[in-house]
Image (cartoon, rainbow, N blue to C red):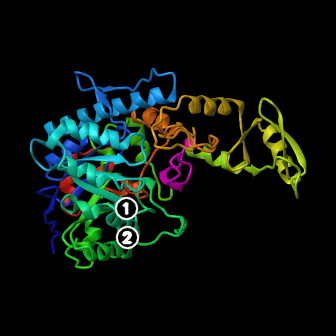
């Protein structure tokens, strides 16, 4: 029996149940989302520090002139609004009235609500839906409803959606376009693992989505689609989800697979690296300055973070218990106390050239080279507030401009590395987000022999089940 994919109603129109996953910074663009929409599907551009463009349509790299974090933060928000507007207009132009255009935001990005208002107030009905995750986007619904735009929360459990519905969304039922279930063990980028879930023990998505549907049905949302995100490749592998009363209306999101299309803006080096990914190369880790788990390709960038973590050891401010060995840290040579075993480890790291001991907010030390210590300090001082609160720099979008905690050298500047890799930087030396199924590029006929399909060709293949 041939595979048949039926249209679904999303954001006020009948479209293929195929949705582009929003990838920031600068990876899901007006060009990619417009192409998805033009193919009769749903395109999603990322409004996470979206690129502004010049008169020729070329990206304008962000530049910050402010001397303080708060001044740079204001620049970042203004540039993000301008970039979001530019990408929305480009997507609309390419779509030609077909499909739907959605905008994706990271709820924990700095100024997320201001960026949403800034873009939506200018583009009107050029954007049909807004997706938001990485946090609990309670205020997504009232903002979207204000602009008569559908909203799509990204959740990883039925419990999360129940909280969102009861606290906020029940007041804005008519604009709930769908609920994105993003699998926390399979999706790329930031993942919604809770403290109650084991990152090393993946749970199958089917029972978790069934549980989400049951909760939605409790609230009378039987006809509101669920969008399955994370681990989706060939739709012929998901036929038991189609026309399934336990699942209900369903659409599928593709984040990793579009990376190797002609419209994808990632560099040739990045595309070449993705073609070499093997099963297990994508690692779930907790180095992100957001505090969330995230999934990225294991490379030199991630390797260095794991090496930092391996050097970590606890210290005390005074001798206590096993912590009896004095050790001097910092430019003021403050004395802290280590265990005898850790004092020996510290000496070993010093012999390896990792002579800088950096204190963390958890009363631990990590050991890095002087060059890496200087880079970490420079990145922390250069913070532009890209997150609502940042573990790495201790920035927060509050009156004080700080989390009130020490900056954490175990993390990294996410804005710096994502801007670099998005604009031609070495994919081995930067954070390279990807879904855990990225290894399937090697076995996918659509990408065989270095082939680079158009998004139209990708959507057609997905619609066939391929």
Q: Nearer the viewer, residue 312 or 314?
A: 314
Which segment did they paint magenta? 282-301
Q: Is 298 within the magenta? A: yes
Name the residue at the left extreme.
Answer: 97
Q: Is residue 297 left or right of residue 183?
A: right
Q: Is 89 within the magenta? A: no
Name the residue at the bottom extreme.
Answer: 245
Q: Which residue is under mark 1?
A: 155
Residue 378 percent across, percent down from the top left: 60, 28
The N terminus - image quarter:
bottom left
> Looking at the image, can residue 234 be seen?
no
Q: Which residue is under mark 2?
A: 158
- Check contact, mark 2 vs mark 1: CB within 8 A: yes
Residue 12 percent across, percent down from the top left: 12, 56
- Badge 1 crowding class, 10 Å Cα cut-off, few under 14, some 14 to 19, many 20 or more, is many
> Looking at the image, can residue 102 be seen?
yes
Asked which quadrant contains residue 464, the reply is bottom left
Residue 412 is marked as: none
Q: Secondary structure at mark 2?
A: helix
């Amino acid at each position: 029996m041939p595979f048949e994919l039926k249209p679904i109603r999303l954001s006020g129109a009948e479209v293929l149940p195929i949705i582009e996953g929003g990838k920031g910074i600068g990876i899901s663009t007006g060009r990619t989302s417009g192409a998805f929409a033009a193919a009769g599907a749903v395109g999603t551009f990322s409004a996470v520090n979206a690129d502004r463009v010049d008169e020729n349509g070329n990206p304008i790299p962000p530049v910050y002139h402010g001397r303080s974090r708060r001044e740079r933060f204001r620049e970042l928000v203004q540039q993000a609004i301008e970039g979001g507007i530019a990408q929305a207009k480009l997507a609309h132009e390419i779509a030609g009235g077909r499909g739907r255009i959605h905008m994706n935001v990271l709820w924990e990005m700095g100024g997320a609500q201001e960026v949403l208002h800034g873009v939506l107030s200018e583009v009107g009905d050029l954007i049909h839906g807004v997706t938001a995750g990485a946090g609990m986007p309670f205020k997504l619904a009232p903002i979207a409803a204000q602009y008569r735009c559908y909203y799509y929360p990204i959740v990883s459990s039925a419990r999360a959606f129940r909280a969102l519905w009861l606290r906020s969304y029940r007041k804005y039922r008519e604009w709930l376009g769908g609920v994105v279930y993003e699998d926390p063990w399979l999706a790329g980028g930031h993942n919604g693992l809770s403290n109650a879930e084991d990152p090393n023990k993946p749970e199958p998505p089917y029972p978790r989505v069934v549980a989400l549907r049951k909760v939605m049905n409790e609230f009378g949302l039987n006809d509101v689609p669920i969008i399955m995100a994370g681990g989706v490749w060939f739709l012929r592998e998901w036929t038991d989800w189609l026309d399934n009363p336990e699942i209900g209306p369903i659409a599928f999101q593709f984040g990793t697979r579009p990376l190797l299309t002609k419209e994808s803006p990632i560099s040739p080096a990045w595309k070449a690296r993705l073609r070499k990914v093997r099963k297990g190369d994508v690692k779930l880790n907790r180095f992100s300055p957001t505090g969330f788990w995230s999934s990225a390709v294991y490379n030199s960038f991630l390797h260095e973070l794991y090496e930092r973590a391996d050097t970590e050891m606890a210290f005390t401010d005074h001798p206590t218990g096993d912590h009896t060995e004095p050790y001097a840290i910092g430019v003021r040579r403050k004395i802290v106390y280590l265990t005898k075993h850790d004092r020996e480890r510290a000496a070993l790291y010093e012999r390896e050239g990792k002579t800088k001991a950096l204190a963390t907010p958890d009363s631990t030390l990590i050991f890095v080279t002087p060059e890496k210590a200087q880079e970490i300090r420079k990145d922390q001082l250069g913070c532009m507030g890209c997150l609502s609160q940042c573990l790495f720099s201790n920035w927060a979008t509050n009156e004080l401009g700080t989390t009130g905690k020490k900056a954490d050298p175990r993390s990294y500047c996410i804005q710096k590395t994502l801007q670099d890799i998005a604009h031609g930087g070495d994919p081995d030396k930067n954070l390279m987000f990807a879904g855990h199924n990225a290894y399937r590029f090697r076995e996918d006929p659509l990408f065989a022999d270095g082939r680079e399909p158009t998004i139209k060709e990708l959507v057609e293949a997905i619609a066939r089940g391929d």
